[in-house]
Amino acid sequence: MEAVVSLSLPDNWITDVVEQFPSVIKVIDSKTSSNGVRDLVQIEVENEDDLPKVIEQVRNNPNIFNVDISAIDRGKALAVFSTNQCMVCRLLAGTECFLTGSTTRNGRMSWTMLVTEKKALQDLIANLEKLQAGPKLVKLTEIAGTDELTQRQEQITRMAYERGYFDFPRKVALRDLAKAFGISTSTLSEILRKGQRRIMTRYFSEHRQY
């Protein structure tokens, strides 16, 4: 499911990143330490060229220290660091809520998240209420398993597959594919994400093991 939640929280490094760079931030673990919070975070950017910029932004954040970041793919990195004020990390750690976007308007933030379980979203909202963040569920959309690929999405996803975009390491860069189709990298990234989601949804709906 895709959820949109409106809330009021101080600025933090996660919202700073997702507002500037199309990316998904997953807080894998968050532990309390003597000088703050120690976090293990996965950062995945849509445009692989943005990864060095995101890493630099994290390193230069005055509230983040003892940083250890390792790139595990061209567009993905694992980061371990300490922070003295990241309520978002504490809230998201260990949940099945993946932050994919954040915008700010009229003093309130709007989080867009991918959610695998409704209970995870309910628990997150309850914790936000405890922080007096005034959370409001704006929208909850279930990703339908009956969606079919459009002809354009199938064409682009197939070519990306045939040219080795999904290989590790990748045989073709996102910007080169975008140039071949005459579209922007952000548009191509969105098309590929939708294509992958629909392919995976269809596959898992046809191969249920329970």
Image (cartoon, rainbow, N blue to C red):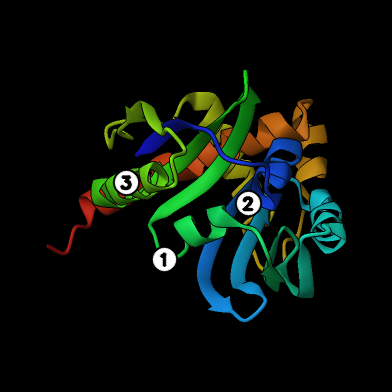
Badge 2 amino acid: Glu
Q: Considering only vertical position in the picture, is 36 above or below 123?
A: below
Q: Classify residue 65 by image quadrant.
A: bottom right
Neighbour class for label 3 at 10 Å: few (<14), some, many (≥20)? some
Q: Which mark is residue 6?
A: none
Q: CA distance from mark 2 to mark 1?
A: 36 Å
Q: Earlier in the sequence, mark 3 or mark 1?
A: 1
Kind of residue at disc 1: Gly
Residue at (46%, 25%) from the top-left corner?
150
Label annotation for residue 162: 2
User: Callout 2: 10 Å neighbours few (<14), some, many (20+)?
Assistant: few
Q: Say which of marks 3 and 1 sits in front.
A: 3
**Where is residue 176 drawn, in percent x and y?**
82, 43
- Between tags 2 and 3, which lies in front? 3
First along the sequence among labels 2 and 3: 3
> What is the x, y in percent for residue 103?
62, 29
Residue visible at 22% across and 57% down? 207
Along the viewing direction, whichever of 182 and 184 lies nearer the viewer: 184
Question: Which amino acid is tagged 3?
Answer: Ala
Image spot of residue 96 (x, y percent) = 38, 56
- Residue labelled with disc 3: 126
Farthest residue toward the top? 106
Question: Observer-nearest residue: 130 or 39?
Answer: 130
Q: Which residue is mark 1?
A: 94
Q: Residue 178: percent from the left, percent from the top?
A: 77, 35
Look at the numbered disc 2 and give the secondary structure of its residue.
Answer: helix
Extreme residue in the bottom direction? 34
